[in-house]
Amino acid sequence: MSWARSGDRSGIRSTMVRRRLLSAVTVLIGVVTVAFAVVHLIPGDPVQTMLGTGGAFVDPAQEAALRHELRLDRSLPDQYFAFLASAARGDFGTSFQTGEPVTRLIAEAAPASLSLAGAALLLGALIGTAIAVLSRLTDSRVLGSVLAVLPVLAMSLPAYWVAAVLLQFFSFRLGLVPALGGTGIRGLILPALTMSLPTAGVVAQVLASGLRAAEHESYVLMARAKGATRARVVWRHMLRNTALPAITLTGTTVGSLLGAAVVTETIFGRPGLGRLIITSLNAHDYPVIQGVAAVLGATMILISLLVDLLFTYLDPRVVSTAVWR
Amino acid sequence: MSPEPLLRIRGLTVSYPGAERAILTGVDLDAPAGATVAVLGPSGAGKSTLVVAIAGLLPAGARVGGEMWFDGVALHRLDEGARRRLRGRHIATIPQDPAVALNPVLPIGVQVAEALLIHGMAGRQQAARRALELLRSAGLPDPETVAARYPHNLSGGMRQRALVACALAAEPRLVLADEPTSAVDAVSQAGVLDDLASVTTGTGRTLILVTHDIGLAIERADWGVVLDQGRTVESGPIRRLAAAAQHPVTRALVAAAPHSRTARLRPRTDPAPSGTAREPAETGQLLRLERVSVVYRPTGRRFEPVRAVVEVDAHVRRGETLGVVGESGAGKSTLAALALRLVPPTAGRVLFDDADLAGLRGSALRAFRRRAQLVFQDAYAALNPQMTAGTAIAEPLRALRLANRAERAIRVREAADLVGLPASTLDRRPRELSGGECQRVVLARALVLRPDLLICDEPASALDAAMQAQVLQLLVDVQAELDLGYLFISHDLAAVRQVADRVLVLRHGRVVEQGVAADVLERPAHAYTRALVEATPGHRTAPKLPVHHVPTGGM
Amino acid sequence: MTLLAVLQRRVGGPGRRMPPVTVIAATLILLAGLACVVVPGHLAPHPPDAVAPEAALLPPGWGHPLGTDELGRDLLSRVIHGSRLSLLVGAAATLLALLGGAAIGLVAGLFGGLVDAVLMRVVDVMLAFPALLLALGAISVLGSSPTRLAIAVGVSNVATFARLIRGDVLRVRGLAYVTAATVSGVRPAGLLLRYVVPNVCGPALALAVLGFGVAMLESSSLSFLGFGPQPPVADWGMLAAAGRDNLADAWWLSTFPGVAVAVTVLAATIIGKAVQDRRGVQ
C-alpha cells in the first residue's frame, strides 16, 4: 500500500480536526439541552417550587413575572430556542436568590475553582509521576508492592475524608494553615492536596502501567544494548513514550476534578463553582443551576477537544497510524 | 593451533525460578575473531535467549550458569555495571523487529549517536556528525534527511539499516544479530544482509547471526552452531554442517530450508504418486473472480479510500490449488475475504459454481457457507477462547443445523482424525493447545462441513519450520482425499511451490503475473516476480544439498 | 472520562499483578462488610440509637472502640448499622449502571451505524457532566431516599459503562474468531450469544466490581453533602458529615466512617483489578 503514503498529511489532519469539532458542537448542543431540561424535569410546577411557599398565598404578579422570566408562558419549542439563543450569548438570566445576572455569579466563582483545579492537577501530576517512576526504578519487592497499591489507594479515598484528616492534622493540631476560608496560596494548599489525590492515582497508574509495558518493548532492549544506564532508559526512552497518553488521560479527568470540587469547596468553605451549585440546588435557584451546568459541560467538552487536538499535533505517529489502520 | 576465539561459551545454562524447564541447558559456542557464526535451530530452541545472555540483558531473576569468555574476560564473573560498559561499546545487539526496536518518539540521528554519548566517546556535535557517516555506511544514501526523521517515516528496510547503524556506532568487536531480516519483506531482505555483511566482514568484526534458515546461514556465515531445546547439538564449518548433517534437528533444518523445498508435495495417501495426474480442464471452475475491484471507503481512522484489489481475474478449479503470492499489503487477504463473501466487490463479480455471491441470501447463502471454508493465518486468534476444541469443530454443523447432537459428535471425530488431532485434545480450550494443534482444530472446523473450496490465508506462517512442513503436507493429503479446491495465500514462495498448481502474483492489488506454478516461479516473466524469487534466501548460491526427508507423521 | 474509565484501563503488557496478600485482605474486608449488611445486630456492641448523655464524645477506648458522638451513641455500632445502607446503595447503583450500560453498549456496538452514532452522542453528553454533578441533578429531580440515591448514582454512571462495554463489543467483533464464526455460517443471534457476550462478560464483570467502589464514593459524597437519605437512617457519608462540626475536638467522628468507605472502595478496586488479571482483560 505504499501509494497510500502519498496522502496529504495536512489534509488528513484538517479532516480529523473538522470531524472532532463537529462532534464537539453536537455534544455542546446536547449539554445545553440537558441544562434546559432541568427545569422541566423537576416534578411539579417550577414556579410554585421556586416561590416555595407550600400552597400559601403567592403574589400573582410575582408569579407571572417569574413565569415570564423563565419563559414558561411560551410554547415549549419557543422556550427551547429562546434558551439556546440566550445561552449562545452567555445569558442565563438572573439568580432568584440575589437578583444578580447568572453570568456574573459564574464569572466571580470560576477563578477560585479554576485555580484550585489547576493547582490540584499540577500537584497530582507531580505526585503521580514520582510514584510511577519510583516503582519502575526500585528493586525492592516490598516497596514495589506498596507502590502498586498506592495509586489505587489514592483513588479510593473519599474527598471529604481526606479533607477532614488534613484539616485535623495541619490546622487543628499543627496550626500551620487556616482551617476555613483561607485565601491566597496558604488557603489553597489543603484543598488542592485533597483534590490532587485522585489525579495522582490516575497519573501514577497510567504512567506505571505504560512504563511496565514499555519495559518489554524492543526499543528499551535496544537502549540497554547500547549500554544505557537504568535511569537513562527510564527517563529518556520509556517516560517519553508513556507521557503522551498519560497527559491525555489526565486532561480528561478534569471532569472528575470539577465534581470533587463540589465536596472540597463545601468542606473548606471556599467560594467557587462547586459551592455555587450546591447553594443554588438547595435554594432551587434554577437559572444558576442551568448556567453552571451549561458552563461546566462546555468546559469539559472544550478540554477534551483541546487534549485531542494537542495529541494530534504532539505525537508524530497519530497521523500515520490514522492512514495505516 | 587455532587462536583463542573472541567469544567462548561453555555449558551455558539459563533458567527462571518457577519455570517448568530451563531455557538453555548447555550451550557451547566458539566465535573466532573476524568470523561470522550462525546460530541455528527451530523456534523455542533458545536462540534469542542465547543472544540476550551474551549481551547481559537477561531479566532480573534469571539464573545463569556456565562460562562465557569475551576476549579473555570472564563475562560470567562481571557485575551489572561492568557488563553495561561492555554493551554497545564492545558487544552490540541488533534486535529482531526493526518496526519496534527504534524508539518511536526520538529522531533516528539521536538514536544512532546515543551509544557514542553513553560511552563518552564523543561530544554532542561530534556524535551527530558521526551518526551521519554511520547511516551512510549502513546503506542509507541520504543520511541528513534520515537522521532528522522519526522511525515511522521509514520503510522496514531503512529502519533495519538504521538499527545496524545504531549498533555499530561505537565500533564494537562483537555484533549479535537476532533474525535481523525476519520482519523485512523478501525484496529488501537480501539488501539489508548485504549491507550488514559489508560493515562486519573485512573489518575484523565478529558477527553472531541468529536464524532458522540454514540457506541464509550458508550464504552468510563461516561457522554454524545448531541449538535444540537449549543445548548445542552440532557445530562446525557451516557448509560441512549443512552437507553432512549428523543430528536429526540439523537435517530437519536443511530439509525445511526454502531452497530445498522446490518440488510440489505429493499426497501420502495417493496410491500411485505418478501417472494419475488430474486433468484440471475436465472439472468446472469452482470459484471465479471477474475483473474484481475493492475500494475500502474512508473510515473513522483512515481518511483516504484504499484500493485493495484492482481488476483481478482469477479462478480455482476443484482439486487444484491456486497460490496467491505478494508482499504484505498487496491485497492477498482482501482476495480471501472476497472469495468468502466477507467483503463485497466494489466492481466486478465473484462467482461460486457460476452463481454470483452478491445475490446469495438465506438458504443459498448458507449452502455457500457450507461449501467454502477458511483456514486462518493465526489459528489461535481464530478460536473463541471460551469454546473447547470439540465445540469449535462442531460449531459449523450446529450453526447450519446439519446434524443432530449424536451425528455431530461422530463427524467431529471424523474431522479430527482426518487432520490427526488426538481425541484427548477435543475438550481443551485454545490456550491449552499448542500452535500446531490450534491450526489442526481450525482445519478440522473447516473440513467438518465437507466443503469444496478451502481458502488458506497464510495457514502455516505462524508456525516453525517443522510444524509448517507438517501442516502443508496435511493440506496436500486432505486435498487429494476430498478433491478440494484451494486458494492458497502466502508470502512464502517456498510454501507456495510445495502446494500450488498455479500461481497468481499480486502487487498493489493488481495481478502482475499468473500461470502454472513451476513456470512462474522458475522462469518469472515479470521483473517483480523475479525480484521476489531472487530474494528468497539461499536462492543465489543454491548449493547442492542432500535432500533429507522429514518425518511428517503425527505430532 | 470518569474515574471508572481510568480505573479499568490497562495499558498493554504483562501487568504487575495486585500483590496476593492485598487480594486476600480485600476479600476478607468485603466479606466482613457483607456480614455487617446481613446481621448488623449480632456484630454491633450497642444498639445504634442508644443515647447516653453521660458518655458523650468519648474518644476511642475499651468500651467504645471507635468512640461516641455528642449524644453518647457508640460510633462502631452506628458504622456497622450504616453499612447496610451504604453497601446496598452502592451495589444497587452498580447493578443499574451495569444493566443500563450493557444494554446501550451492546446495541450500539452490534448495530453500529446511525444507532451507534446517536447513542454515543447521548453518552457523550452525559459524560460531559461530572458524574457527581449528574447525580446531584438527578437527586434534585427525584427527591431523596435510599432507592432514589441508588438510582441517581446508577444513572450518573450508565454512560461510562455504556462507552466501555461498547468498546469491548467492537473489539471482540473485530477478532478473527468472529470472522471464523461468520464463515462457519453462524447467524447474527448466535454470534451475539455464543461469541460476543461470553467474551465481553469477563471485562464487564471486572468493570462492575471497580464500578462498585466508584458508586460507593459517589453515594457517600452525596450523603455527606446532605443529598442522601434523611435522618434517622444514617449511612457512612452522613455519619462523616455529622462529625464535621466536631472536627477540632472529636476527630474520630468523621474519620472512622470515612475510613469505612475508603477501605471498602479500596477492597473493591483491588478485587476488580485482580479479576482483570485473572481473566486476562486488556
Image (cartoon, grey):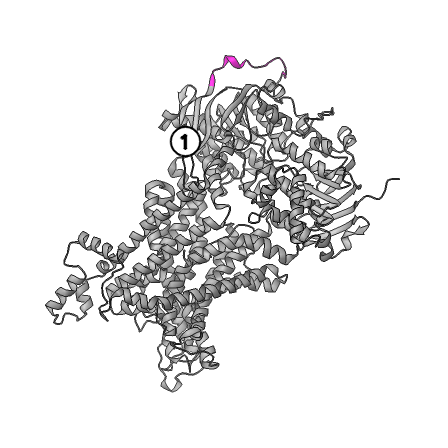
Give the residue furthest to the bottom: C54
Question: A9 or A179, which lies in front?
Answer: A9
Question: B283 or A95, which lies in front?
Answer: A95
A50 shown above or below A309? below
Identify the residue shown where x is 38% and y is 42%: C110
Q: Given the image, what chain letter belongs to the residue carrying mark 1?
A: B
B206 shown above or below C227? above
Q: Is residue A10 left or right of residue B495?
A: left
Q: Is residue A156 visible?
A: no
* Residue C220, position as x, y percentages in the image: 38, 67
Rendering quarter of residue B223: top right
* Residue B203, position as x, y percentages in the image: 76, 40
Question: A39 or A145, which lies in front?
Answer: A39
Give the residue furthest to the left: A60
> Per the image, is B282 magenta?
yes
* Residue B449, position as x, y percentages in the image: 47, 28
Identify the residue shown where x is 62% and y is 25%: B533
> Per the image, is A122 magenta?
no
Residue type, numbered disc 1: Arg
Rendering quarter of residue B210: top right
What number of labels is visible? Answer: 1
Q: Is residue C172 visible?
A: yes
Q: Is residue B258 left or right of residue C78?
A: right
Identify the residue shown where x is 38% and y is 82%: C72
How packed mark 1 is, by other alpha carbons closer than 10 Å (few <14, some 14-19, many 20 or more), is few
The residue indicated by pointer 1 is B401
Question: A190 or B212, which lies in front?
Answer: A190
* Residue A243, position as x, y percentages in the image: 52, 55
- The secondary structure that most of the magenta stretch takes on is loop
User: Which stretch appears magenta?
Assistant: B272-285
